[in-house]
Image: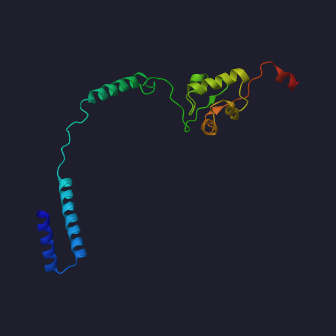
Amino acid sequence: MDLERAKVWLYRMQQRLAITRSEATALLALAGLLAAGMVARYVQSRPRAVPERPFAATDHRFQQGAARLRAAQKDTALPEEEGSDAPRALTAGDTASININAAPPAELGRLPGVGPVIAGRIAAYRERHGPFAEVGHLRRVNGIGPKTMKDLVPLVVAPAPVDTSGAEAKGAQ
């Protein structure tokens, strides 16, 4: 019966407002949308209950892991960070020159872009093929590309090897 009463009420309103059935349907739909929008706005504006510390149960694990990481970083810190007298890494602004034919791998490792692995490769290349005739021959070492070479050129020298066999003395006579 309530549905019948609603239909009668709507029919009377339609007659009093002098609107067609389509217009009445549109007005009813707009009124419904307005009510739905007001409800949605009310629900969104209410404060939400957020747990105070959602990850409190696992925070201690994170803290333990962070402490272990900090301890590991302190154990493997570079000597220059600890304030020791170890040589620092060279940069492009330095004027020091390293003889690539005589420098030990530890000194070669100070060069930019050259770590212990590439320094070992340079030393191994020297042992296998003899001294470098010029700085550009560093490109023959695996791991030294154009970018690294550009950084190395102002910092290294490759002096001509000294001939100790006396060939120069014979050629001068």
Q: Residue at x 21, y 74 (%)?
A: 24
Taking 96 as reference, is 18 left or right? left
Q: Is residue 110 left or right of residue 156?
A: left
- Res. 121 image quadrant: top right
**Closest to the observer: 48 or 72?**
48
Tell me residue 83's x, y (percent). 42, 25
Quarter of the rendering containing residue 168: top right
| Total tally of numbered discs in the picture | 0
Q: Residue furthest right?
A: 173
Quarter containing the C terminus: top right
Task: Residue 170: give x, y in percent of width and height.
Answer: 86, 22
Residue situated furthest top in the rendering: 165
86 relative position to 71: left or right: right
Q: Residue at the spot x=60%, y=26% of the render?
A: 119
Instruction: Give the residue drawn at x 24%, y 29%.
Output: 57
Left or right of 128 in this view: 150: left
7 or 71: which is nearer to us?
Answer: 7
- Residue visible at 66% across and 32% down? 157
- Which quadrant would the N terminus be assigned to in this image? bottom left
The answer to which quarter of the image holds residue 133 is top right
Percent of width and height locating residue 73: 40, 25
Q: Residue furthest bottom?
A: 18
Camera-side residue: 105 or 83? 105
Q: Quick one: 100 or 42, which is closer to the camera? A: 42
Scheme of colours in the image: rainbow
